[in-house]
Amino acid sequence: MKKIFRKLGGFGFFGTQLSLREQAYFTSRLSFLVGAEISLTQSLEMLLAQSRKEKEKKMLRNIISDVLKGNFLSTSLMHSSPKFNNLAVQIIKTGEMTGTLCANLQHVSIELKKRQLLWQKIIGALFYPLCIGVATIGVTGMITLYILPKITPIFSSLNAKLPLSTRILLGFHKVLVEYGIYLAIMFIIMIFATIFCFKKYKKFRIQFELFCLKIPLFGTMLQYYEVTQTFRTLGLLLKSNVPLKDALQNISFSCMGAVYKKEYLILSEFVTKGMPMSRFLATKPVLFPLMVSQMLSVGESSGNLVEVSTYISEYFEREIDEIIKKLGSSLEPILMVVMGVIVGFVAISVITPIYEITQNIKK
């Protein structure tokens, strides 16, 4: 059983990584203490004394031990358990190299908070459709599995001819009763097989992500989310005097999507040859909106790449807000209609034969 949990931990479950909120809180407090000219070791020890969660205490003890041995804070965070955000580690490393650790810690805190808020918006937008879907399945399942079987013997005893909708529903019920266990097992196997392939095989993960990006509205939201994170990070790294090639590599290391990770590494080699980013991104319309390459072209020609990157991230963050608003207003009537059709079909399938039998008895 422990091996199973360890495997699941590799997929990011069961607290193997600090949440964005926890990481933002940690870097914010550490930035304040370092800015107050308290030594790094003392600052970490103060955070350890204030910590209430065991996983944070364990991480801080390991970090303090590494720092006392002369290791960099970023090196310790890179190998810490629970895991720390890769991008945050790279920015902290830059701060240690350039003597701007306090400022970079604050930048990391702000960036992680923005990521958390943006992710919460996306999750909130998907929560309502999920609730409607679960409610529809629950009502349909209750009627099909519990109510319909109790009145089926009455239909059989009276030799009544059942409507087509009722026969379909009874056939569905029969399949669930006889093969439900096998279907559940197959469904679970498919889920674990998908997770395994997603984790193990890079090509499968890339194709899966490309498929998700082509889903209407949902794919656009994922695309805008990645663009927002990328260019906010790029602006932050360039502001910290990180070379463009290194900044793109850092973004690649911290990127969650395999398809974007691959493209950022290719892009870093592309710009090393003196080619503009805008030309490369213009050839990737599935991953980057056309507007991104156009705005980057302006920033590259004017030398204001930091400002343009920041503007791109802010623009597409606003676009995500608009998509979320549209998602709620457009999906709500569709979901209600779908739910009404499904529940109405089930209800008619149950009520119609009862009504017909009652009419025959009266005659």
Image (tube, grey):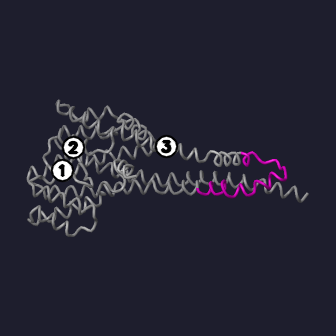
Give the residue drawn at x 85%, y 53%. 158
Q: Earlier in the sequence, mark 3 or mark 1?
A: 1
Indicate which label's residue lies in the foreground, 3 or 1.
Answer: 3
Disc 1 + disc 2, Cβ < 8 Å = yes
Q: Earlier in the sequence, mark 2 or mark 3?
A: 3
Give the residue pinned by disc 1. Answer: 91
Instruction: Give the structural element (helix, strand or loop) at label 3.
Output: helix
Say what amino acid the circle numbered 2 marks: Asn
Question: Residue 292 placed where, x, y %?
Answer: 30, 40
How busy is the neighbourhood of tag 2: few (under 14 within 10 Å), some, or many (20 plus)? many
Q: In which image quadrant can residue 103 be found?
A: bottom left
Question: Residue 313 placed where, x, y %?
Answer: 28, 48
Give the main secondary structure of the magenta stretch: helix
Residue 128 falls left or right of residue 256 = right
Say what amino acid the circle numbered 1 marks: Ile
Instruction: Give the structural element (helix, strand or loop) at label 1.
Output: helix
